[in-house]
Structures are given as structure tokens and as C-alpha cells.
Image (tube, grey):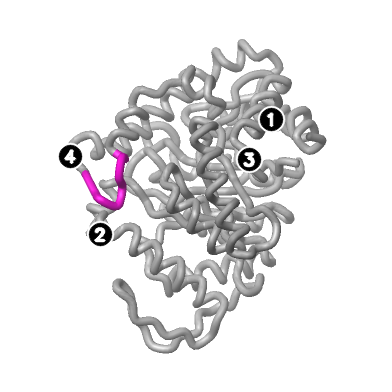
Amino acid sequence: MIDVGLAFFPDVDERDRKAAEYFAHCLDFVELGDRLGFDHVRIVEHYFRRYGGYSPNPLVFLAAAAQRSRRLRLITGAVLPAFNHPLKLAGEIGMLDALSQGRAEIGFARAFLPHEFQRFGVDMNESRDRFDEGVRVIGRLLAEEEVEHHGTFHSFPPTTSLPRPTQRPHPPFWIAALSTQESFQKAGELGYGIMAQPVVPDSLRTNLDVYRKAWKQAGHPGEGQVMLAFHMLCMPDGETARRTGREPVNRYLRTLAEGAGEWTSGADSADYPGYRRMIEKLRQDDFDRLLERGSALVGSPEEITRMLLDYHGACGGFEKASIQFYFSDIDPRLARASLELFAAQVVPALQRA
């Protein structure tokens, strides 16, 4: 069975949609998703540009979402320890967990956009070490009291983070990973879920095999938890869906290329091997390529069901699909109709699979 949730990745700014309007629609969708029985709602942390910049603090949005829902899990997808003090993040996570009656789940990511590191005055070559220290310390602050820490980037005397988490020892943790096997292995060793992108199924399968093997070797029960994020537009007629979705998906890809543009104009870091080449390849991506490899679920309910199940088999399986249905300049009425059709016809088929 594949659990399905709602993903919000704002790729707009004031030129496209005012923030108040954008988030009003998002919270209406949260309420709808809760009523339709979706599994979770997830949102990113990014800054300053159209690519994600409307969501500098996912915990703020999820606190609002907690009040518009009763059962949805509330997932950060993901917070960035490189730009946040662990004492601050731990307290905010405990607060969200309390406000939601124990529905918080926390995804962590390293961050990868050079312009964010530059503006926060953080060296990209410290990225992995900052991430590792931040996740480790936040886990301790949530699980333990009177935590003392003297690390490379942060130090503090014995401290008890408040409020204490509602879920013990802490909310479920996730690690966001793209292509580095080390990230998949470490998430498995730690017993955390993995948030990945639906890239080429064969390469993803290799990384997921690394994750699940590390999970088992560390002695954790079960098989681990894998979440993939997909763009989605579901309409009764597949050709109409593809004709309608082509430009919004392409526009999203252009926004990504703009947001990560420094990688192709001189940015470099030993902590991000291969990223320049990867971003250059992303700049050549388009709707047809995403559709071909299963990253964009655009079509009729029957077509989308087949795409998801085919990808599930090809990559070795995943437990959660996080669906980005309100993206780019898609009309919110179209996004709502797409979500309702997906819930009525695709989700039941996935639950039977």
C-alpha cells in the first residue's frame, strides 16, 4: 500500500501571486486533504527567490495546517540545520508537536542553493558537518533533558528544550537525499526515513538498496520508510491533462534552474561533488523528460495509477508519495478538481495494490 500526501513547494513570488492569497489556497487544500483522507502535508524551507522563497519557515505553515486538520501528519520537507541554531529548531519542533497533538514529523536537508549560503554567511564546504552536528544535537535536545553540547559550530551549557515533544523520544525524523549514497546509508543506519526525488528509477533503486541494507544491518525493525515527491495533474482525459500541464511543469523547471543558477556560473564545493554537472543537466530538463521517467504524474486517473505503480516496481518500492498538485501558475480551481479526482480514483487503486 502506498500512502499519499500533499506537498507544497511554492515556486511563485509577488509577480505571480500575493503570499496571503497563496497560503489561503494552501490552507484550504489542507482542509480538503484532511477530509479526503490523505496521509500528510509537507512543505519546504528555502529563501529569497521564486524557487521556494515563500516558505522560509515550514514550521510556521505546519502550525497553521495543524489547526485546519485533524489527522494529517505534518512533515517538514525539509528544515535546514545549516541556517538554524539547534536550540531554536528543537523548541519550535516541540511546539509544533504540541499544537498538533503529536502529528509532527521532521525532515532535515543539507541545503544546496549557493545564494542561500552566501546570504547567511555560511561556508558551503561546512555543509555536511553542520548538517550532521545539527541533526544529532536536535535529536538529543528532543529526547533528553539537561543536554550539554560543545561542538564545532554550536556550544551551550546544560539545557532542557521546551516544550518537551508530545511524541517520545521525539517526532519521526526523515533525511532528504538526492544522489549521494552516503546520505542514503547514514539515514538507514540512524533509523530515519528517507526523502528522495523520483530520478531515473535504476539509479534510485541502487540508493534505496543501500538505505534498506544499512537499516537492517543497524538492527532497526521493518524495512525503513521511503518518501518520493511527484508533480501531479489529474484530469478525466489524459491528452487534455498533458496539454494543460506542460507549461506549468516547464515553468517550475525554469524556476529551479534560476534558483540554482550559481552552480553553472562558478559556485563549487567539495561537499557537493557533481552538483554543477547535475544542475547543468536539470537546465536541459523539460516536461517530456519528466513524464518519460515518471517524475511528473500528468494524465487520466488510469494513466497516473499505472505510472505510480510502474515506478514503485522499477525503483524497488516506496511507502509514501508526496504529491505536488498546486504548483507554478496552475489555477487553484483546476488544482482542486485534480486533487479530488486523484483522491476518488487513484488513491483507492494504490491502496489495493
**What element does badge 1 sit on?**
helix
Compare marks 2 and 3 and give the one earlier in the sequence. Answer: 2
- Image coordinates for residue 49, horizontal then vertical, percent: 33, 42
Marks 3 and 1 close (CB-CB < 8 Å): no
Q: Earlier in the sequence, mark 4 or mark 1?
A: 4
Q: Which of marks 2 and 1 is nearer the N terminus?
A: 2
Amino acid marked by disc 4: Gly
Disc with the residue nearer the chain's start (4 vs 3): 4
The residue that mark 4 highlights is 266
Q: Measure the alpha-carbon separation of dots 4 and 3.
A: 35 Å
Q: How busy is the neighbourhood of tag 3: few (under 14 within 10 Å), some, or many (20 plus)?
A: many
Q: Give the distance between the C-alpha atoms of the residues marked 4 and 1, in whole angstroms.
A: 40 Å
Figure quadrant of the C terminus? top right
Report the residue marked by disc 1: 309
Sort mark 4 into few (<14), some (14-19) or many (20+) by Cα contacts within 10 Å: few
Distance (Cα) linking label 3 and label 1: 11 Å
User: Could you tell me which residue is drawn at 66 percent across and 61 percent down?
Assistant: 103
- Mark found first going from the N terminus, 3 or 1: 1
- Please tell me whether mark 2 or mark 1 is closer to you in this view: 1
Q: How far apart are marks 2 and 1 (CA)?
A: 41 Å
Q: Please state which of residues 295 and 97 is positioned toward the viewer in this rendering.
A: 295
Q: Which amino acid does label 3 sit on?
A: Ala
Circle 4 sits in a helix, a strand or a loop, which is it?
loop
**Residue position for label 3:** 321
The residue that disc 2 covers is 122
Magenta-highlighted residues: 268-275
Amino acid type, callout 2 = Val
Q: Is the magenta stretch mostly helix, strand or loop?
A: loop
Circle 2 packing at 10 Å, graded few (<14), some (14-19), many (20+), is: some
